[in-house]
Amino acid sequence: MPECVARARSFASTAVFGYPFDAYEIGLVASEIVTNAIRATGALRTWPDDLWPIGMEMTVTARWAHLAVTDPDHRPMPASNEGGQLAENGRGLSIVDHLAAARWVSYVERGKTVHVVITAPGVELTAAELAEIKRLA
């Protein structure tokens, strides 16, 4: 499903046009969490090419961008440093955590949503702002 990853990267990069974000970094974060969702979903079973049950939502403000990727795998996420810096695989969450102001996972009976918040350059979220983003997510 490489085309799904490319579409997610393009969608996220385009969504921040006109805002003070690095479109490349936003696209990179989107592609990493979508790639993880595809791997997790594929580990559950084989899916038809046109029916991958993965969703992506994004909210952008002048201060922050929130990406949310949902997949049907309810198993806990691996640690962000599982692959190590020299590993060919498993570094995605480390990259995401380096670029993100916050990352969390919400679980439901039939899946999970990975949430990532990236702040605009020079912006530090207050605890109240982050709590509000989590409440709205």
Image: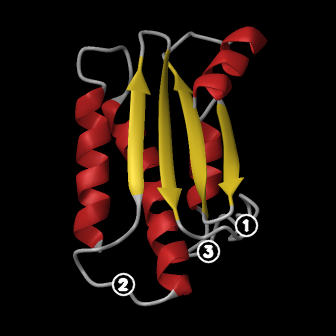
Q: Which residue is denoted by mark 1 in the rendering?
A: 78
64 or 91, which lies in front? 64
- The residue sitting at the front extreme is 109
Residue 120 position (above or below residue 111): above
Image location (x, y in percent) of residue 135? 66, 24
Q: Which quadrant does the N terminus fall into?
A: bottom left
Q: Which residue is denoted by mark 2 in the rendering?
A: 47
Image location (x, y in percent) of residue 118? 53, 28
In front of the other: label 2 or label 1? 2
Q: CA distance from mark 2 to mark 3?
A: 28 Å
The amino acid type found where label 1 is placed reads Pro
> Pointers 3 and 1 in contact (CB under 8 A)?
no
Image location (x, y in percent) of residue 103? 66, 40
The amino acid type found where label 3 is placed reads Ala
Q: How many marks?
A: 3
Image location (x, y in percent) of residue 93? 62, 55
In front of the other: label 3 or label 1? 1
Q: Which residue is denoted by mark 3 in the rendering?
A: 87
**Circle 3: element type:** loop
Rate crowding at label 3 as few (under 14), some (14 to 19) or many (20 or more) other CA atoms within 10 Å: few
Residue at position x 59%, y 49% from top? 114
Mark toward the start of the polypeptide (3 vs 1): 1
107 or 25, which lies in front? 107
